[in-house]
Amino acid sequence: MNILIVGYGFAGNQYFRALDVLKQTSERLNDVAVAYYDKKDKNSFVPYFADLNQALSQFRPDLIIVTVNDAFHADILNELSSFKGFVICEKPLANSSDNLEAIKENLKNIRGFYFNLIERYSQATQTLRAFIERNQLELVRAHFTWAKNRLNDYRPTVGVTSEIIHSLDLIQYVCPVEANYELHQVIGSCSDFSVSGADILDSLSITAKLNQAVVTGYSSFVNISRTREINFIFHNPMQDIIYARMIFDTPEWDEDTLCIWKHTANGEHIFEKLLTEKKHYPHGKQAINKFVYMLGDIINLIHGDIKPKVNLPDLQTALTLQVLLNEIERKAIVLEPIEFFPKKERQFLFTENDLEKLG
Ligand SMILES: NC(=O)c1ccc[n+]([C@@H]2O[C@H](COP(=O)([O-])OP(=O)(O)OC[C@H]3O[C@@H](n4cnc5c(N)ncnc54)[C@H](O)[C@@H]3O)[C@@H](O)[C@H]2O)c1
């Protein structure tokens, strides 16, 4: 199986390291060959293509992983009109100015599309999802904070919609509702935090409804610490109040916690409490637990038609989420752009190896 990584930066590297681990642990992956296409030659020992069409015709990939910066996903996806294999695309699908119909049209020949929202692969997410289903819980209220600091970061971005997508997807994924979000209000701020421009959305607060439940949340790219938390309040069939809290990648990558409980006259009754098991991969291979599970699933699916343990969103779900992100961006009420870099000089303080800072 030939796998082409398109965009060999921080995330591209995570995919490569995860594939390396999988190859060492499964004989079934002996036949996997990896190459990459990037604007820049990263001088890696991995075979490099400087031209996408050349990579397609010479390397003949079975699977393409799109991990260029979020602002350029559509540029790559629109080049795949003759591609007949599988595609994994990093979130978000596109930019608010990209033509979604054109993307759909250009992907009409592919065999399968997996939109990577990696936190679906957290054990915390899986456990909460199963608990909600088993206990027929109905969401009443959810609140999220999903934020980090991307000041002094060299990577271009579409803005904070690339961040808020995780929590919006997770809330919808763990609760078995068919409904889409009904967006009410959006306030935010924009700034020159990113190299992408002087007024890129850096933070958002939203209120929305998902079926009868109220969802509120805050997401930011200029939060001074990494915070990834979702709080849930449910009703069980007896209308008791059940609480759940998920925290991701804290204090380190891949360390996720989940607690599900209710208050009783005798104190808290805890139904589930877990801290996800962190595998200790060798130095330089950290922060890939979920990528290993996700890629293993998708390769098994391509190899042997084995159903994945976790359903990654398909193209239609990615498009629906993109429509929501575009609406959020359109509705956001913002003040004048903040100038973090009034001298127009910016220092890039992190490299691809700064795992704690990037992501
Ligand atoms: N799932 C996750 O946890 C996670 C974590 C980090 C990033 N991401 C996603 O991965 C994507 C990439 O982010 P990153 O942090 O790796 O960025 P990055 O800047 O580290 O890497 C992007 C790479 O793409 C290359 N590139 C950009 N445009 C290109 C083009 N048109 N053609 C060829 N190469 C091009 C750049 O040269 C760079 O090497 C983004 O969509 C981001 O949202 C996901």
Image (cartoon, grey):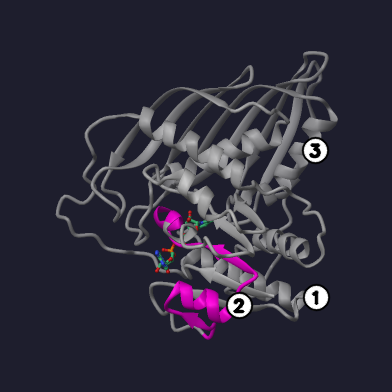
- Describe residue 200's horizontal placement relative to residue 71 as left or right: left
Disc 2 marks a residue whose amino acid type is Val
Disc 3 marks a residue whose amino acid type is Ala
Image spot of residue 33 (x, y percent): 65, 80
Give the residue pinned by disc 1: 28
Total numbered badges shown on the rendered structure: 3
Image spot of residue 123 (x, y percent): 73, 49
Image point (17%, 56%), residue name:
344
Q: Residues within 10 Å of mark 3 (few under 14, many from 20)?
A: some
Give the residue pinned by disc 2: 34
**Which residue is more in the foreground, 92 or 257?**
92
Q: Secondary structure at mark 1?
A: helix
Please report the bounds of the magenta region as a residue range: 45-74
Q: Residue 211 in magenta?
A: no
Q: Residues within 10 Å of mark 2 (few under 14, many from 20)?
A: many
Image spot of residue 49 (x, y percent): 47, 79
Q: CA distance from mark 3 to mark 1?
A: 30 Å
